[in-house]
Amino acid sequence: MAEADTNTPGPGRYDPGEIERRWQQVWDAESTWVVANPGAPEFDTSRPKAYVLEMLPYPSGEPHVGHLKCYAVGDAIAHYRRRRGFNVVHPMGYDAFGLPAENNAIQTGEHPRVATEKSIESFRKQFRRWGVSLDWTREVATHEPSYYRWTQWIFLKLFERGLAYRAEAPVQWCPVDQTVLANEQVIDGHCERCGALVVQRRLAQWFFRITDYADRLLADFDLLDSWPEHVVTMQRNWIGRSEGAEVIFGGEELEIDFPVFTTRPDTLFGATFFVLAPEHPDVERLAAGTPYEAEVREYVNQAARASTEDRGAEDREKTGVPLGREVTNPANGEKIPMFVADYVLMEYGTGALMGVPAHDERDFEFAKKFGLPIRRVVVPPEGEPPEDQAYVEHSEGERLINSDGFDGMPAAEAIEAITNWLEEQGKGRHAVNYRLRDWLVSRQRYWGAPIPIVYCDGCGMVPVPEDKLPVLLPDIEDYAPKGKSPLAAADDWVLTECPRCGGGAHRETDTMDTFVDSSWYFIRYLDPRNEDAPWGRDAVDYWMPVDQYIGGVEHAILHLMYARFFTKALADMDLLGVQEPFQNLFTQGLITRDGAKMSKSRGNTVSPAELVEQFGADTIRTYICFMGPPVKGADWSDAGVEGVFRFMARVWRLSREVDGRTDPSGSADGAQGDARELLAKAHWAIDKVTRDIDPRFQFNTAIAAVMELVNEIYHLKDGLYGDPAGDGAVRFSTSTVASLLFPFAPHLASDVYELLEGSRVWEQPWPEADPALLEHETFVLAVQVNGKLRDRIEASSSASEDELLELARASENVRRHLDGKEIVKEVVVPGRLVNLVVR
RNA sequence: GCGCCUGUGGCGGAACUGGUAGACGCGCAAGGUUGAGGGCCUUGUGGCCCUAACGGGCCGUGGAGGUUCGACUCCUCUCAGGCGCACCA
């Protein structure tokens, strides 16, 4: 039989473009992936539910391969769950507000909406071209008033509860983007977006009180089923919970008490100095009138000018200036000198610390530099710790010294005892401190959801009433940032009427951080056209939580933590019935090219749109899943793509041949010999693919198993044609290839399955392996002598251990290695191997 | 500096709870088909060595030790690469 020519167009050639278009039309025309909410007539109550969700894209330009990978992985899971009998909701939307569109507007003068919507259109087109099984009736974009109306509504709910507040605070300011940033958006002192060095400014800003949820954000990791360990660790570290004590040092001279946070109250008697951060509000007052006044002022100014980066630099020598004042150590009444030094951070603890040089490396360095006493208060059970460094580590049996009544007490015990004693004296208490700061959500930028607040001279800060939402983002002429929101120039919009007294008022001109928009989109998908509420409870209670969330690890802290916070806050308002939004999280690895991250400047990008035109969506999607385990990163290879294309064409040709040479009504009943062997391989593949997809996300090995099955069909088919059971086995195996390939290559799989079985593969339940066919009558017994492989012998699966040993000993090569030696041990692993240990 | 992850053929990777290392794909080689090329089909392909061949031996999962009848897998140390955190009191 003449083999098909895959170079020339025509009916004898695998033509992914034609096949993919045809099936996409079917899915579109029949709304195949649309799923009803509970209450709707077509809703199927008999099935369990699965919410499969990929992180929504930020629409900027065209989608890149990272998007394709994310949605290829998510779609495979969605398809698999559907055929496992779940009601699957698999929606899509766009995180449409944000800086890149606005920066583009500044350059081109084009409204950010225009560029954003152009980009959305190209994402939408690509998602369809890729054949992703999305329920398009649920599509949302966060920049649409019908969406951000509810973002504003949620803001007001948080405001009502005291979870949104305005406060003046030192904040991180990006001088290039001309806006404040959340702490989470400052990476090593630089703006996450543009890389500029951020500076600190004191500004009145809007915050969300995420710190109220710090403990629950930590504790509720227990409620999750499967999250990558490193993501949980990153969030834990970010929240940075420390247990310890707050200790009050009395400043009698000015009658100011200074509380400090410490994790080591057991070392309290070793405090020999006291340090304030340069930003500490009392620094100026303390220094006033002392000989150090000028020097302190100079130091504080210098610190304010120094970048966060410089201050945090590694191995930086300690600096500081005495304040000329003293505070009293509440433990022993000792007066200790005060300093201002920039190794103390205003944003951690109380912006002040007690210096215990004997037991803290930083304090040790500082004490050395300033010639301060170093008094050891904890010692190991024997031997002296070295003099030239702080004794920090906790060791077994260490005890307190120089600590009055606590001398001799084990350090671990002393932490509790000293804190209790301070509590009795009213000079301290047990305390927990967090690294996490409240979430700064206001931005001095245009392209975001306006904060729905009005300032009235008479009434003050007034929330916009719910029935006046949305506060529409007005069109403006000039997008350039000027240190305040470009909205401030839109006079007609800014000047408004106070909702409370009707008098003159002006609007808040800051917009919300885009992470606010994306903190609740997964809920809106469930009831996206609701005009009376952000969502209806029936739909949300049914679908939530997201059963499988898929996205890049770059959102490990920001988005994932904010969304968890929103979910908890909304649950507390009884608007939601779950505590955690994402029950299982999968983070896909980065695709690189030539070992480097793809970037336009490096010129090593690959265009999904072009690839899909050239090879078809099935090939590219399957290749991405086949490159390696999706959880790991992988390097792009054009040759690899061609290999997968060849495999697709091979499946396609096989299906045409099998259809021409076997009868659709045939059955593999009573298959013997090669026919049975082929059936066994098909069932092995079913079993393997199922186990690889479900808990493991090992799509690469699942696809490899299907390739093995295809190879087996090619090897055996010619000998089987003509025999009824043989025909049945070939046909069954080939349609099984289609069935198993469907989650990765849905178009080709639909095509092949329909050709051979006359039905829609997505309407068929996921195949189940027949246990009888997974069993084999014989197996290859590995025979080892002293752990080294010496022979492989075909053995009956039902053979006893003695029979296996006999077989092993009978092997000529084995006998050669046993020659003249004594067998001291015989190890038999039934179904696998025999190991003879000789001396 | 601290924490986590990863090191397997020429390449991407496989080996599920310790049990035949290298599945599958790429690349390469040979044969078949073809007017040629491409394509397709088949076979081979970790290194070194013995053998005319059949067959067989030794080494081999970054390195060094250890546990075990048996280690890519477990333990200790170490090297390399990646990621995260980084004066957090």
Image (tube, coloured by chain):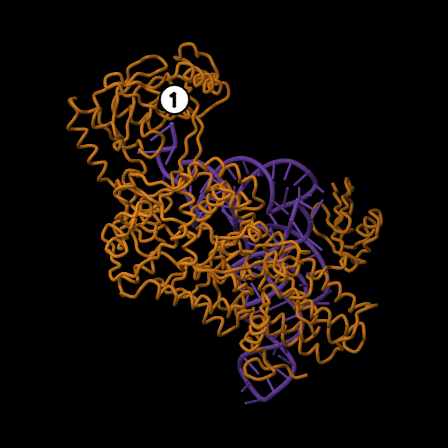
Chain colours: A orange, B purple
Q: Could you say which quadrant of the image residue A729 lies in?
A: bottom right
The kind of secondary structure element at disc 1 is: loop
Query: In this rendering, is residue A117 above or below A503?
Result: below
Work out which quarter of the rendered image holds the C terminus of chain A and state it: top right
Q: Tag 1: Cα neighbours inside 10 Å, few (<14), some, or many (≥20)?
A: few
Q: Nearer the viewer, residue A311 or B79?
A: A311
x 54%, y 65%: residue? A132
Query: In this rendering, is residue B59 above or below A96?
Result: above
Question: How many numbered discs sit on the rendered protein?
Answer: 1
Q: Left or right: where does residue A669 sit relative to residue A182?
A: right
- In the rendered image, residue A718, in percent from the top left (x then y), is placed at 73, 76
Q: Left or right: where does residue A470 sit relative to residue A573?
A: left
- In the rendered image, residue A406, in percent from the top left (x then y), is placed at 44, 12
Q: Left or right: where does residue A724 sit relative to residue B51?
A: right
Determine the residue located farthest toward the top in the rendered image.
A405
Query: In this rendering, is residue A159 above or below A740?
Result: above
x 58%, y 68%: residue? A31
Q: Nearer the viewer, residue A351 or A617?
A: A351
Q: Could you say which quadrant of the image residue A48 lies in?
A: bottom right
- In the rendered image, residue A378, in percent from the top left (x then y), is placed at 42, 18
Work out which quarter of the rendered image holds the N terminus of chain A and state it: bottom right
Q: Nearer the viewer, residue A808 or A460?
A: A460
- In the rendered image, residue A199, in percent from the top left (x then y), is placed at 26, 44
Q: Chain of mark 1?
A: A
The amino acid type, in three-letter code, at marker 1 is: Pro
* Residue A669 appears in the figure: yes
* Residue A309 appears in the figure: no
Name the residue tied to disc 1: A386
Q: Nearer the viewer, residue A15 or A180?
A: A180
Determine the residue located farthest toward the front in the rendered image.
A502
Q: Could you say which quadrant of the image residue A79 lies in?
A: bottom right
